[in-house]
Amino acid sequence: MLRLEGLSKWFAKGTVNEVQALDGLDLEVGTGEFVCVIGSNGAGKSTLLNCVAGTYPPDKGRILLAGEDIGGRPEFKRARLIGRVFQDPLLGTCASMTIEENMALANRRGKRRTLRPGIRDLERERFREALSKLGLGLEDRLKDKAGLLSGGQRQALTLLMATLVRPTILLLDEHTAALDPKTAGLIMDLTRDLVEGGKLTTIMITHNMQQALSFGGRLVMMHRGKVLLDYSGSEKERLTVQDLLRHFHEANPLIPDNGVTDRMVLG
């Protein structure tokens, strides 16, 4: 379980450029929940994930993960608990390393390093089996450099690596936004398989409202660093894109309808 209590974060505080990205945000995500988070640019979505991951320290509030207060831990110490996939497919893998080398690093996340040989046959077979489930033929390319893969292949590999060692929580930061629609659909199918199959506690940020309605059991809309709306179960199932647009316009009356539709539905 993840619990955020009164989380606040400022950037450039005390200057003319001061921005409050999170404003006393409270949020609880239950074990095994798949939560989709939407909101306009500047709503605080990515800042939320960065605070959970340890990239940004919060200025106020507490972050409790599996009952532990992790707010004071550096990012590298949280990595054993957190799986993360970024918007840019190039960020999740090392281009100069082979597929199996990238997977070996992910497989040893949070474990003590030893002087044993690099990749054992048992590990290699596990990697091959996991990759075969992607249906991309990567199980036969273990020795290929990750830099030779397409953006979609690298994002699929990153997603697999993020869940290879079961994370306490999986953070997905618009992880299909940089992909073409067909590839994005494949990655979302893979996301559903991994998250639901592994019963992983997951927070997924998206600008695509249809995606937010189709995936996960809970939908949260953020606005100005706070939770504006929170739907789950049958309430979420009854929602439509037009419902979400209406709620968004009620919170942002000065933004033209067409502009919001383009950014958030096609986003």
Image (spheres, rainbow, N blue to C red):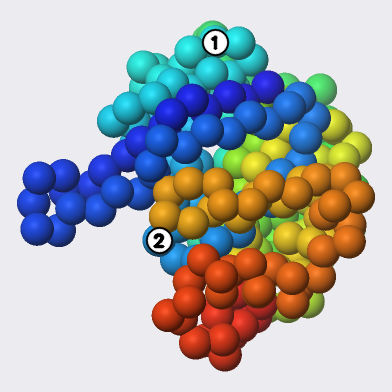
Tell me which residue sits at (64%, 52%) in the image. 229
- Point out the frontmost of discs 2 and 1: 2
Mark 1 belongs to which amino acid?
Answer: Glu
The residue wearing badge 2 is 42
Sort mark 1 into few (<14), some (14-19) or many (20+) by Cα contacts within 10 Å: few
Instruction: State how many labels appear.
Output: 2
> Could you tell me which secondary element the residue under label 2 belongs to?
loop
Q: CA distance from mark 2 to mark 1?
A: 29 Å
Sort mark 2 into few (<14), some (14-19) or many (20+) by Cα contacts within 10 Å: some
Tell me which residue sits at (83%, 54%) in the image. 236
**Position of residue 175 in the picture relative to residue 243 (left or right):** left
Q: Earlier in the sequence, mark 2 or mark 1?
A: 2
Tell me which residue sits at (52%, 33%) in the image. 26
Give residue 225's position: percent from left, percent from top: 43, 49
Tell me which residue sits at (47%, 37%) in the image. 25
> Could you tell me which secondary element the residue under label 1 belongs to?
strand
The answer to whether residue 106 is seen in the rendering is no
Q: Which disc number belongs to residue 54?
A: none
Quadrant in the picture for residue 121: top right
Give residue 213's position: percent from left, percent from top: 79, 62
Task: Reply above or below: 212 against 160.
Answer: below
| Quadrant that contains the N terminus | top right
Task: Reply above or below: 253 against 34.
Answer: below
Mark 2 belongs to which amino acid?
Answer: Gly
Give residue 12's position: percent from left, percent from top: 16, 48
| Quadrant that contains the C terminus | bottom right
Q: Which disc number belongs to residue 68?
A: 1
User: Is the C-beta separation of discs 2 and 1 under 8 Å?
Assistant: no
- Front one among 98 and 2: 2
Task: Reply above or below: 2 against 131.
Answer: above
**Position of residue 45 in the picture relative to residue 195 (left or right):** left
The answer to whether residue 58 is seen in the rendering is yes
